[in-house]
Image: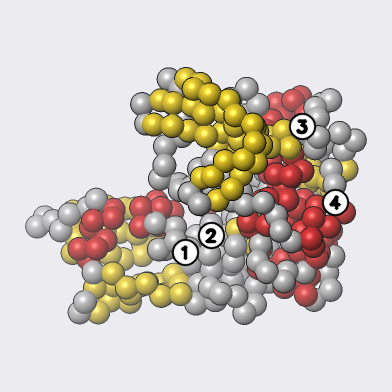
Amino acid sequence: MNRTIYLIITFYISFLFIGQSFADDNIRVLMHEDTDLPVPSEKTENIRNLTGKIFINGKTYNGNFEIKKDENGLHVINSIPFEEYVEGVVFSETGKDWELEALKAQAVISRTYAVFHKLVNGEKEFHLTSSVLHQLYKEENRNPLITLAVNKTGGEILTYKGSPIESLYHSICYGKTELPEEIWGESYPYLSSVECNSKETPYENWQRRFTLKEIEDEIDVKEIKDITISAYTATGRVKALSITAGDDETVTVFKATEFRKRMGYKTFPSTDFKIIKNSKGLVFQGRGWGHGVGLSQWGALEMAREGKDYREILAHYYPGSVIEKKQY
């Protein structure tokens, strides 16, 4: 990110942050099950306001709801008490039997992430979504240890020079965390490349097999002849792919992040992979899950298992940031 632009954004967020109340306030969440679903357009009109319990895709949600309509259909926005939302996110973003200190770290970054986006989107219809476009919020918390973690860190957020940080995080990485500028072209002083710390995770190794036709259908490039890795990031992840297609063998360069998005995040867990070619198509062998920037959730869990507390975990993944407990 250009330094001048970063300073302007930081000043803007600092200005909004002064005197604001978040922990006892509500946050507006667009109930959004999939990243491919549309978000409300500028032509959205309010249909009805509801209070109570509703069912969405087999899940139960409580709160105050706005039902909105536009050319794409109906949208549901849930207004949730802030700390209840944090509990729901920690429950959705972590696994069973996680260490308390890892849960505390997740509570702080989930709260920070929500505060950041509430400040940026304060005047909009919703502050963030319930999908991986932002952070997961799927169900009510049923784990008393998560309630304890949220209560023990109540009101705590990560700041840099007095402003809430954009506390980006992901599930699993190996080696070192990714630099944000490699993915989004923006750098942050509190997001550098550090050791991932992941061990014995569900995605220590993954493998996906595709025919060229299957890839064509997903990325909308016809008559693919070959796919090769054309560039790597500073941390060794794939940055770009060269795709040769057509009788004239035109070469199209795809950003690896865009390729992963088109193939599907669940289908293609990360951009940390290599390509093996065989007679049937391509085999992608990789490791990790997610964009690799910021805190690694499984790395945080491993640090907690090694006896690190949540403050040490957060200091490792967000160097230069400060934990502040605001009197909301």
Mark 1 to mark 3: distance in Å? Answer: 35 Å
Q: Is mark 1 on a helix, strand or loop?
A: loop
Which residue is under mark 2?
290
Mark 3 to mark 4: distance in Å? Answer: 16 Å
Which residue is under mark 4?
151
Of callouts 4 and 1, the N-terminal one: 4
Which residue is under mark 1?
269
**In the image, farthest residue toward the left:** 247
Name the residue at 84% across, 73% down: 307
Q: Which mark is residue 25?
A: 3
Mark 2 to mark 3: distance in Å? Answer: 30 Å
Tell me, yes or no, whether the two marked residues, 1 and 2, touch with CB atoms within 8 Å. yes
Give the number of the mark in front: 4 or 1: 4
Name the residue at 41% across, 75% down: 207
Is 248 situated left or right of 129 in this image?
left
Report the colour scheme: secondary structure
